[in-house]
Each structure stands twice: as structure tokens, then as C-alpha cells.
Amino acid sequence: MKQRLEICHQVESTATGLPDTAQFQAWAEAALLPDVASAEITFRIVDTEEGQQLNRDYRGKDYATNVLTFTFDEDMPDVPGLPLLGDIVFCAQVVEKEAQEQNISLNDHYAHLTIHGVLHLQGYDHLEEDEALEMEALETRLLAGLGISDPYSEEK
């Protein structure tokens, strides 16, 4: 029987202390909404140079960011039975720096960014304030279910 979620875990980084495949699997499964029948997601961890290049090439921003989400079926017609497809790319050095600045564990930050990315794959966004509040509330609830503190508590 095919799993609901199939992941590919790629590490193209020199960083240490990175999450393993099982952790990404658990975090992504927690973020999949009930109406998603199946998903295939690649989680890729890169260093600053690749992170900056991807952000520049795809978003027009010439700096490395913590996480980028690439949805494969964004421009495709809605096809019943098509799995949720996408890549989530983390820049290890940016994620580590943010975790240190926010005084949270590296794993908790990766969990948050994984859930954030998986929600993006499912159509959530944070461009408008109401969308951001909805997405943040869902992230907070999903993280609480994993025993992880609210990443937005400082902002509230």
C-alpha cells in the first residue's frame, strides 16, 4: 500500500546537526490537511550560496532566505487524484542563525519552517494580513500538537 506522504531528503550542505528523514516525515505529515489524499515532497538543505542563487533566480531577491517553497502543480489544472507535489529548500546557515537569535532549538525551528513550507504547498500564503494571521494560527496549532512552543509568541 502506498503511503499518503512520500518524501525525498537531500542534504547539499556542510552544516551539522540537521534533521533526519524521519523528522521531516513526521513534521510534514502533521501539516498535511485531511483533504490531501497523497503528497510527494522533496526536502533539500543547502548552503548560503545555493540558497541565495535560488532566491535571486525565483524571487528576484539577492540574499539567502530561511526556506523556499516550490509548488509543481501551481499552474496546472485541478486534476483529481494528482498528488500534492513540491520542493521545500532550507538554507542551513540562515535557519541556524535565526534559531540562535530567537533562542529556540534548531530542530524546533526546522519543524516550524517545514510546517510553514507544507502549508504553502497546500495554498496558504501570508501576503495579506488576514492570510498571515490564518496561516500563523494554523502553524501554531500544528506545532503545539508536536509539543513545540508558539513561534509567534514574541510578536503577540
Image: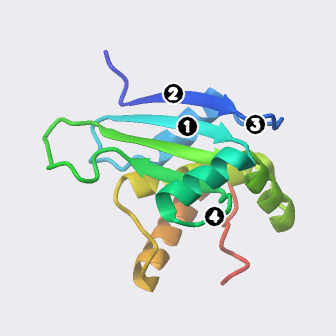
State how far apart marks 2 and 1 are (Cα).
6 Å
**Residue 69 visible somewhere in the drawing:** yes
Check if mark 2's residue and mark 1's residue have beta carbons within 8 Å: yes
Q: Nearer the viewer, residue 74 or 142?
A: 74
The C terminus appears in which quarter of the rendering? bottom right
The N terminus appears in which quarter of the rendering? top left
Q: At label 4, which amino acid type do we have?
A: Asp
- Report the residue at 61% width, 58% height from top: 144
Q: Determine the image quadrant of residue 151.
A: bottom right
Pointer 2 or 1: first along the chain: 2
In the rendered view, does 32 fall on the left or right side of 51?
left
Provide the residue designation for mark 3.
18
In the rendered view, does 116 fall on the left or right side of 53?
left
Q: At label 1, which amino acid type do we have?
A: Phe
The disc at residue 30 is none
Q: Determine the image quadrant of residue 122.
A: bottom left
- Report the residue at 85% width, 66% height from top: 101
Q: Nearer the viewer, residue 5 or 48?
A: 48
Pointer 3 or 1: first along the chain: 3
**Residue 147 visible somewhere in the drawing:** no
Q: Secondary structure at mark 1?
A: strand
Q: At label 2, which amino acid type do we have?
A: Cys
| Farthest top residue in view | 1
- Report the residue at 68% width, 32% height from top: 12
Q: At label 3, which amino acid type do we have?
A: Leu
Provide the residue designation for mark 2.
8
Percent of width and height locating residue 94: 75, 56
* Relative height, residue 15 to residue 102 (above, below): above
* Relative height, residue 156 to residue 13 (above, below): below
Check if mark 3's residue and mark 1's residue have beta carbons within 8 Å: no
Pointer 4 or 1: first along the chain: 1
Percent of width and height locating residue 112: 62, 55
